Amino acid sequence: MADQQQLFKVVIDNITIEVAPGTTILQAARQIGGEVAPPAMCFYSKLKGSGGKCRTCLVEVSKGSEKDPRPMPKLVASCRTTVMDGMEIKNITSKRVIEARAGVVEFLLINHPLDCPICDQAGECHLQDLGYEHGKAGTRYEFQRRTFHKVDLGDYIKLHMTRCILCYRCVYVADQLTGKREHGILDRGDHSEIATLIEKNLHHDFIGNVIDVCPVGALTDKTFRFKNRVWFTKPVDAHRDCSKCCGEVQLWMRGDEVFRVTARKDEWGEVKDSSKGTPGWICNECRFEKKQVADWELEGPSKINRHSVISQGHYVGVQKPAETFSAIMGGRKPRLFMDIHSVSEVNKPGIQLSLIEGPATSDTFDNAPTPEGA
Ligand code: SF4
Ligand code: FES
């Protein structure tokens, strides 16, 4: 077995693993899995050249290699550093890493608004998770923050540049999937912004994938914006015969209504490979135009990590508690004093959600809004 590949032995957070030469520290840590894998806001294994922008994946190399055991003086970006034989790495076991990551999160949050309560990415936002894990309650920043107007990028995508963390993932998607990039990062330093120059619309069958790769709520699906919280919807795996893409998707349903269609994601939040072994990017037709259950062959509920907020309310065999208010008030329902409709830009004033029977549907917002007082 002379040509059997020699593997490198590396230790990450006291766990030993053998990986092929050329593997990055991040990919080696992902092979171990769980908390040992550093967070990654800009690296995306299916996009060539990604990584090295956000610094959330910093780790400490406490032993360089078997041949040269000196530690690396600075923390390194694990998505861009390849392993050496005998390397020892610390992620969650390093105080320096935890402190540095808190600093990176503080930097990312300098301009990023904390508008999670109205942001469509809430519940699936990696920055939100990092903010909870490492963020501070207050800010030390005293200057004016960067703000931008929202921009319509074509019929289906909305750019909310104020939330962008300049990870470049969407630029790589446009470069590598559509072959017809019309947007990029303009200007430098704190003037940098994602733009289509003269606000050209992005038209390509696969451009919708920028929504799936955006780690925050900067690029959102206009057919889903503000229609539901992701944790109220139920993810279901489904497929259809599609001539453009693999046709293997996740439907985000409430009752029988399909609110949103996305590619299927793996445990790292990246698009999964399709059953044919190719990356499971999906086309705009599947994503934006197939919103009827009849368009799809349903496979069954998607498996969601039970620690994700999305899994809330989707327990099997749950017994709901009795309605205490009406029980103690002789069957009467409590009166609610708060009316959020007049104070939120998210709610259209003409639509009174409290008067609609059952959950709101797309029709409530698009075609047949319930008139005030109806
Ligand atoms: S819009 Fe989203 S995907 Fe594009 S650079 Fe900004 S954060 Fe990254
Ligand atoms: S994931 Fe490594 S620098 Fe962003």
Image: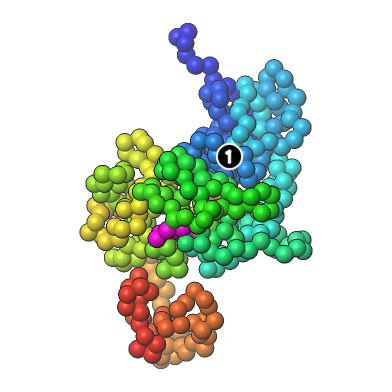
Residue 80 x %, y %: 61, 34
Q: Residue at x 71, y 37 (%)?
A: 75
**Residue 267 visible, this angle:** no
Instruction: Write the residue at 42% across / 63% down.
Output: 222
Label 1 CB less than 8 angstroms from ligand 2:
yes
241 vs 65, nearest the viewer: 241
The residue sitting at the front extreme is 198
Residue at (62, 43) in percent of width and height? 53
**Location of the N terminus (image quadrant):** top left
- The secondary element bearing badge 1 is classed as loop
Residue 50 figure quarter: top right
| Left or right for 44, reference 319 | right
* Residue type for callout 1: Gly
The residue shown at (68%, 19%) is 66
- In this picture, which residue range is highlighted in magenta? 153-158
Q: Looking at this view, is 13 or 26 the one in front?
A: 26
Residue sitting farthest toward the top: 2
